[in-house]
Image: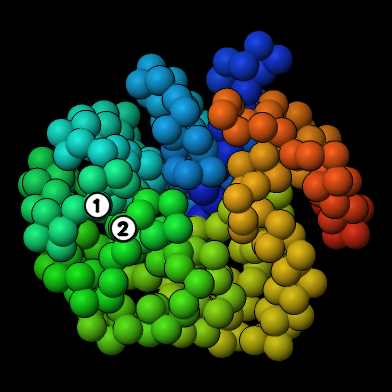
Amino acid sequence: MKFRGTYTVMITPYDSEGHIDVPGLRRFTDWQIAQGIAGLIPLGSTGEFLSLTDDERTLVAQTVIEQAAGRVPVFIGTGAENTYDVIRYSHEAERLGADGVMIIPPFYSTPTDDELFVHYRRISDAIGLPIMLYNNPATANVDLKPELVARLSHIDNCCLIKESTMDVTRVRDIIRLCGDRLSVFGGIMGFESFLEGAIGWVAVASNVAPHVMSEIFNLCDGYKDIGKARDMYFRHVPLIQFVGGQGYVSGTKALLKHMGFDVGGPRAPRLPLPAADDARALQIVKDLGLRFEAGA
């Protein structure tokens, strides 16, 4: 299976009692696919994976995989601080039928490059799924620099990376150092990453604007119409910036609520958006004409 295009790193919806909203997650999965998204990634940072119990992680993964039903690839976030927990989560993802796993580095122990290499090699040796490395030093406290990524790309299953720094020259350098061993997906800087050669985008903003974020990639792919893609991108920069900071969970959920799809608030210790930021979210929804229509 070829992995490319815009993938949504999905929010996790909760019901009024704070439990996983399974029907809501199924509706959200269907809507994303109907809007043209190329892939789905539950249990990433935006999905609050660290705020979920193991049973809830299983429920979310199973629900998305079942509902997607092979229509688009599903990568499951299986990050953890302990190598053996990552292997356990990844084994489960494989058993449930995931197409791959996305794995952020251990985020507290600040491992050395050698420790990171052994970490990912042990995971690769234990599973048969493609591994998407996830570089997000702002949240993980670990930076997978291009030279280390090149080393990791020699591990059998490490064949993709979500490069989520603000430095798009990382995309250039990873491609230059890794060649065809590793496929690069942009993180925060999607459009800019495409211009540097990325073949995909793991996006937060596509939670609320999946069609547009997918179309930006489609227009950049093969350099079909960079000018039109840039215009679409510039129009949606306020949205991308709004969900690109510390409020990426609460902000995305507020936007969806204003679009007509209440997915609950973030889990503690995160708080809902302050009133002023919530007003900004509502204005963005109005300015861009965003709405959630199940089945559309």
| Vertical side of 45 occupied by 63: above or below | above
**Which residue is the site of mark 1?**
110
| Vertical side of 102 occupied by 166: above or below | below
**Which residue is the site of mark 2?**
142
How far across and down, in percent of the image, does residue 283 sit? 90, 53
Residue 104 in sight here: yes
Residue 62 in sight here: no
Q: Are marks 1 and 2 in contact (CB under 8 Å)?
A: yes
Whether residue 10 sits left or right of residue 84 in the image: it is right
Q: Residue furthest top?
A: 17
| Residue type pointed to by label 1 | Thr
Judging from the image, the colouring scheme is: rainbow
Q: Residue 221 got which mark?
A: none
| Screen quadrant of the C terminus | top right
| Residue type pointed to by label 2 | Val
Q: Quadrant of residue 53?
A: top left
Secondary structure beneath disc 1?
A: loop
Q: Could you tell which of marks 1 and 2 lies nearer the N-terminus?
A: 1
The one nearer the camera, 228 or 133, is 133
| Screen quadrant of the N terminus | bottom left
